[in-house]
Image: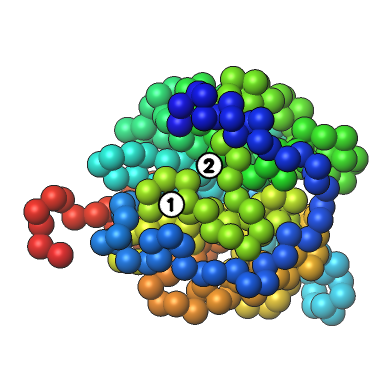
Amino acid sequence: MPAANRADQRANHDSSDPGCADPGNAGVSLAGSAGTDPSRSDSYEVLAVRYGTRATRKSEVYLHFGRYGEPDGPMQMDYFFWVARNAKRTVVIDSGFNELSGARRGRTTLCPPPEALRRLGIAPAGLPTVVVTHGHYDHIGNLGSFPAAELIMSAREYDFWTGPMSKRTLFAVSAEPDDIDVLRRARSEARIRFAGQPGVRQPVAPGIDVLEVGGHTPGQLVVFVTSAAGEVVLASDALHYYDELRLDRPFEQVCDLPAMYAGFELLRDLAADPARQLVAGHDPEVRQRFAAVAPDVQQIAAGPPPEGAAR
């Protein structure tokens, strides 16, 4: 994106609503600009890369867990970032926590995300595009490793985490001031492109759309990636665990509860289409649903066939 265009977008950005307003998902069109037909846009290999993990409990994962009248028990939470790539471009979705912020919270780093990318043949310093689904520490902790990248995120999300409300204790616990400063610097360098709005899928690259659903955070994004077999829905933290859909059970960190429930309804509708693959943001089940192509790397969708190959 040319710097002049980025500057124009910054000038046009409306920062009047940085709070936890319900974005509303009513009337959302499930089809993007290219739908799920890979012949109409670029298609990608999609990878889920597990870079961290921790042991936790149901009472720490689900909002008001005691209300369900069930015994508490252990759970595992995995930490992922995602890669969409083809012969033309590579797009990374989120950047994971860094080792310092993870260690402070008792998280286990399996492989620092910049190193995990290098193992996949991706040089972080030269990467052109990173989609930021939301501003929590475990999703933006390595953005400083992408000094040349354009960062794509919701304006509502940026405004919230750079504004005064984010300093309140129950929000601040999920963020790192240094990580937010990286966002501020990126904007001062005209490297942030704001995308995503409630109820509207927006293309951010050929074959890749985003949709703002809110709920977990004010501007939480869901990412749609076209693959050769259909469409991949990267729910990120709009869906931490598949059981959130199966049991209609919200996650314990929530900005807007009605929006979180509305997001569940949207994801259920999306998952009803067999041509779509729904990927939860933190569920170990991801590693059971999708085949491993390397240690801690699951292939959600294979890459497009080579030019000239039979389809």
Identify which residue is drawn at 50% across, 74% down.
271
- State the mark number for residue 208: 1
User: CB of mark 1 within 8 Å of CB of mark 2?
Assistant: yes
- Which of the 4 image quadrants contains residue 238? bottom right
Q: Nearer the viewer, mark 1 or mark 2?
A: 1
Choose between 43 and 247: the one closer to the eye. 43
Identify which residue is drawn at 10% across, 57% down.
309
In the image, residue 11 sits, relative to residue 131, either above or below, namely: above
Residue ID for mark 2 = 131
Q: Position of residue 7 (x, y in %)?
A: 58, 26
Seen in the image, is 98 located left or right of residue 120?
A: right
Q: Which element type, helix, strand or loop, lies under badge 2?
A: strand
Choose between 12 and 215: the one closer to the eye. 12
In the image, residue 154 sits, relative to residue 68, either above or below, namely: above
Residue 286 visible at all: no
Seen in the image, is 50 located left or right of residue 206?
A: right
Residue type at mark 1 is: Ile
Q: Position of residue 196 (x, y in %)?
A: 60, 50
Seen in the image, is 266 located left or right of residue 225?
A: right
Identify which residue is drawn at 76% across, 28% down.
177
Choose between 290 and 277: the one closer to the eye. 277
Choose between 297 and 110: the one closer to the eye. 297
